[in-house]
Image (spheres, grey):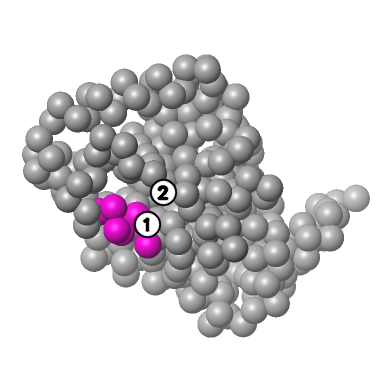
Amino acid sequence: MTASVLISDRAGVRTLTMHRPEVHNAFDDALIAELTAAIEAAGRDPAVRALVLTGSGASFSAGADLNWMRGMARASEQENRDDSLRLARLMRSLQFCPKPTLARVNGAAYGGGVGLVACCDIAIGADGAKFGLTEVKLGLVPAAISPYVVAAIGLRQARKLFLTGEVFDAFDAQRIGLLHQAVASEALDDTVSSTLKQLAKAGPEAQRQAKQLAFRMGGLDERAAEQLDRDNAALIARLRVSPEGQEGLTAFLDKRAPAWIAP
């Protein structure tokens, strides 16, 4: 079987590439498990100075895989809770990775893909990329990623985007703080390389402490995040098995409008 995550090292930079281009790097159990393990391994590896996260093909990550969603629609509340906890661990591992992290957003990012971008210390995206937190259109909420998205874009922007589920472009993503830079696709690699060169000039221990300092000043704590993840996992599990969540997921999979949209 082809690995869902490609790993490469160059001059102290470890690049993790989500490698399911045929489904726009959508999440399934294998991708979540492999990416979590790869992030945690990079955090422990003294040879790694910085971590880059990107996607194969045209997209960064389209969020949940259709077959995965179909399975979750049939799963019990406990199974949905366990599933959400695995996704939450992925986000938490990336957020609190002790190494500098950089999202190279080569294309569209939806749902959990937006969460990955929000969890990275630095996010640079191609100007043609699209973004969306579209869960409410399925009768769900972006529970697992919510702490990290709110920390990245602020409560005011999150309230709007969580409620509307609208799609927005790279320039809006930069304006609200999800991206630090939106650049032309042909300039993406040079911009990422330039940023990595800046990171390489700093002391690794100073960077680790600086990251922890930023978290403390922002009121972010890994242990508290783990408890919040458990609460959010319980929330999304309830919603997935609720009548509205079942209708939203079924309508999406059947490619029809959900019942709450007037004909």
User: In the figure, is residue 146 to the left or right of 167?
Assistant: left
Give the residue drawn at x 41%, y 48%: 7
Q: Position of residue 208 (x, y in %)?
A: 15, 45
Q: Position of residue 1 (x, y in %)?
A: 59, 63
User: In the figure, is residue 82 to the left or right of 140?
Assistant: left
Quarter of the image for residue 123 reads top left
Residue 34 versus residue 133 in the image, above or below: below
| Residue type at numbered disc 1 | Ala
Residue 235 versus residue 181 in the image, above or below: below
- The outermost residue toward the right is 263
Q: Position of residue 104 (x, y in %)?
A: 44, 34
Q: Position of residue 8 (x, y in %)?
A: 39, 44
Magenta region, residue range: 37-43
Q: Nearer the viewer, residue 52 or 144?
A: 52
User: In the figure, is residue 14 to the left or right of 163?
Assistant: left
Asked whether residue 196 is drawn in magenta, I would say no
| Residue type at numbered disc 2 | Ile
Quarter of the image for residue 24 reads top right
Q: Is residue 18 visible?
A: yes
Give the residue drawn at x 28%, y 53%: 42
Dot 2: within a 10 Å radius of its alpha carbon, few (fewer than 14), some, or many (20 or more) residues? Answer: some
Which of the numbered marks, if any, corresponds to residue 7?
A: 2
Dominant secondary structure, magenta: helix
| Element carrying mark 1 | helix
The residue identified by callout 1 is 38
User: In the figure, is residue 166 to the left or right of 221?
Assistant: right
Give the residue drawn at x 39%, y 71%: 230
| Element carrying mark 2 | strand
Point out the tag, 2 or 1, that comes first from the N-terminus.
2
Residue 121 versus residue 34 in the image, above or below: above
Q: Count the marks.
A: 2
